[in-house]
Image (cartoon, rainbow, N blue to C red):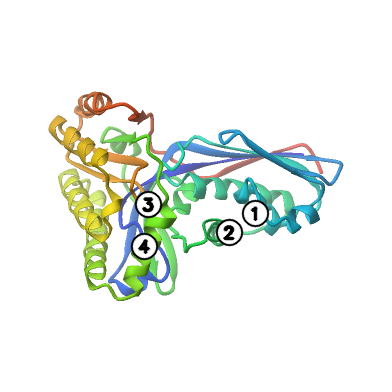
Amino acid sequence: MHIASKAPCRVDLAGATLDIWPLYLFHESPVTVNFAVNRYTYCDIETHADPSIILRSKDLGLAEKFASLAELTAAKRYKLPVLALLTRYFAPETGFTMESLSEAPAGAGISGSSALMIATSTALNRLTGRGFSLEKIREVAQNVEAQVIRVPTGAQDYYPAMYGGISAIELTPAGIVRKALPVSANELNERFVLVYTGAPRNSGINNWEVMKGHIDGNTAIHRNFDKIAAIANLMRHALEKHDWDTVGSLMREEWSYRRKNIPGITTTQIDDLVAVARRAGSTGAKVCGAGGGGCVVFLVPPGKKAKVTAALQAAGTGVQILDAEVAPVGVRVKVTGAR
């Protein structure tokens, strides 16, 4: 039996970090706005007759083998904790080889790990016949990711991997709801440039520092997130109205408040790239995810994409322009062969 799954990564436009429970409960009408990009994560599972479990990551160049599920479960440490912990949770009754691949650069901030968890969980859900809904798979993936990174995780990263497209993730006391935004993928494709700085970052550390400050009653952080929540709602409405001038203005404003929460969210390199892109015609920019490195997304007017791209390419060594477009659909699974 062969199971192949793939799920897209994401770019967040506004409201990130608010999606970490319980932060969103302390702000008015919190929402996160993001979109899926066609940088994919993959999980392939091939069953075999013996009970051994072989885990491999093509992009990391790592592998580990266990004689059985019992041996995997008893292990204290893993080379590939995402694959191992999800396998431990779903507990397949057959031996298999699992191979993963991520097209997201290391520490890019475009949710490569969360997308991989959706791809892997969906494949294991099919293998084991659990019959979990996509929302239940998200819950499992989010909880297991917290076990991996050892700090609380947000919810917004999983939804682009689940559904694709351009989304508003509503964060309410009654639960989390994803709403598709009526924005043309082609229109957005002409208006963004995605750049990898070449410097990985650790989202768990950055988000945890902000979360601790918020929970500990840091009034400055609380006020900044009030502003960020308001901006995210305005961003949603601007996208629904196709008001791109306002979208650019809100990206600049959101970035200014986000920088105040934690100085490490930006770097000299990121500040330089934002300045270079602005001079070339960009109307807005922000880091993806928790910042401190990783990717930066730039909003550009129609016809300016090539100029902004060229300016960023000339800005310094290590900068990589990522060939990316909106991914219209989320995770997909293909099963061949029989049990």
Q: CA distance from mark 1 to mark 3?
A: 26 Å
Q: Which residue is mark 4?
A: 209
What's the amino acid at mark 4? Glu
Mark 1 and 2 residues: CB-CB less than 8 Å, in contact?
yes
Q: Nearer the viewer, residue 283 or 215?
A: 215
Q: Which residue is mark 3?
A: 167
Q: Quadrant of residue 311?
A: top left
| N-terminal label among 1 and 2 | 1
Q: Secondary structure at mark 2?
A: helix
Q: How far across and down, in percent of the image, does residue 230 sit?
A: 23, 63
| N-terminal label among 4 and 3 | 3
Q: CA distance from mark 1 to mark 4?
A: 27 Å
**Mark 3, residues whose alpha carbon is within 10 Å: few (<14), some, or many (≥20)?**
many
Q: Is residue 47 above or below residue 323?
A: below
Mark 3 and 2 residues: CB-CB less than 8 Å, in contact?
no
**Mark 2, residues whose alpha carbon is within 10 Å: few (<14), some, or many (≥20)?**
some
Residue 86's disc number: 1
Q: Nearer the viewer, mark 3 or mark 2?
A: 2
- Point out the residue furthest to the left here: 279
Q: Nearer the viewer, mark 2 or mark 4?
A: 4
